[in-house]
Amino acid sequence: MDIFDILGPVMVGPSSSHTAGAARIGAMARTLLGEEVADAKLHLYGSFAECWLLSGGKLAGITEDAVDEHGIEIDDETALVGTVMEPNLESVAALSPDYVILSADLPAHAELDSALTDMQIPHGYFHMDNVMDYAKIMLNFCAVNDPDGEKYDENVTRVLKRIESIKQETAEKLSGQKAPTVLLLRAYSTGVKAKGEDTVAGAILKELGAHNIADDNESLLEDLSLESVIEADPDYILVMTMGSEENAKTYMAENIENNPAWSELSAVKNGRYIYLPKDLFHYKPLNRWDESYAYIAKLLLNEDA
């Protein structure tokens, strides 16, 4: 018997049913196995691999781009198994992993379900948009790897406490004022789109009391209309970049900023047209989520970020 015989072969998480008994599951696993399970062979992807490491676990395998983009250091015992968008099923199977952790948001991962089930390889699908998603995932992982709760306290409890403090302070300072208006964009080498609360920055903006103009005009999420932006004239224009930041900025310069009306927007004239740091807003910030909140809070309060 191994730990994931206890957790079950397929778990789509995190949900309340999974997190409510996470600590009890971890304790049960250690009791039944008669040992700590931090060395359990797992196979993970992307930000979830970082979460597993933060909880004290070890990796059996990981995708190549997760290593390159997230800067995860691996040893000779950790296998590379394709890319996030094209995981190599043969390489996954060759590891005989105790558990495979996949993204609920990627079609390529969903397509692995039947094959992994046929091979009787336990696997689960997880989703992470905001800090509470992160906290729930860490609760599951720490239940397995962190019996004393030290990793959870360090990487989650501390972060959540600081976030609450930031939210309270920001609410107090913005009290009685009109909610700051924001246009949140994601730019890349061939385009740009407005984004909502299903992003790290979007969720934080909402929690800190800012108003995303895309909430008033959902068509902006599909097609960025400069006319609609000019009409709304947001206080802030915040840009996340995907891929090469240099190429994204080139696209913005050649296709958006070259419009004379752009320079007349309040956000541009007041120096509030800002590119957000990729490590805090493109990638999931994990145990640095409080830094992401602090960065946005300082912008909204006109403090130096």
Image: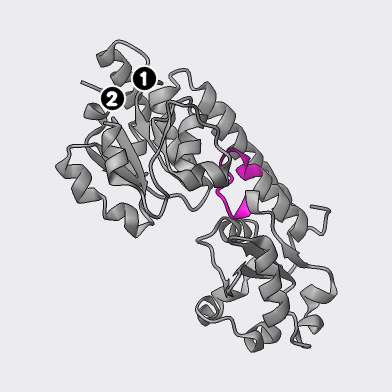
Say which quarter of the image contains residue 89: top left
x then y, percent, for residue 86? 37, 53
Q: Is residue 21 above or below residue 291?
A: above
Q: Disc number at residue 3?
A: 2
Residue 164 showing in the rendered view? no
Q: Residue type at mark 1: give it.
A: Val
x then y, percent, for residue 2? 25, 22
x then y, percent, for residue 100? 32, 38
Query: For the point 31% across and 26% down, which residue is it?
Result: 25
Query: For the point 45% across and 41% down, which residue is it?
Result: 48
- Decide: few, some or many residues near mark 1? Use Cα within 10 Å; few <14, some 14-19, many ≥20: many
Element under disc 2: helix
Let me know if residue 244 is in the magenta part.
no
Q: Disc number at residue 37?
A: 1
* Range drawn in magenta: 280-290
- The answer to which of 262 and 241 lies nearer the viewer is 241
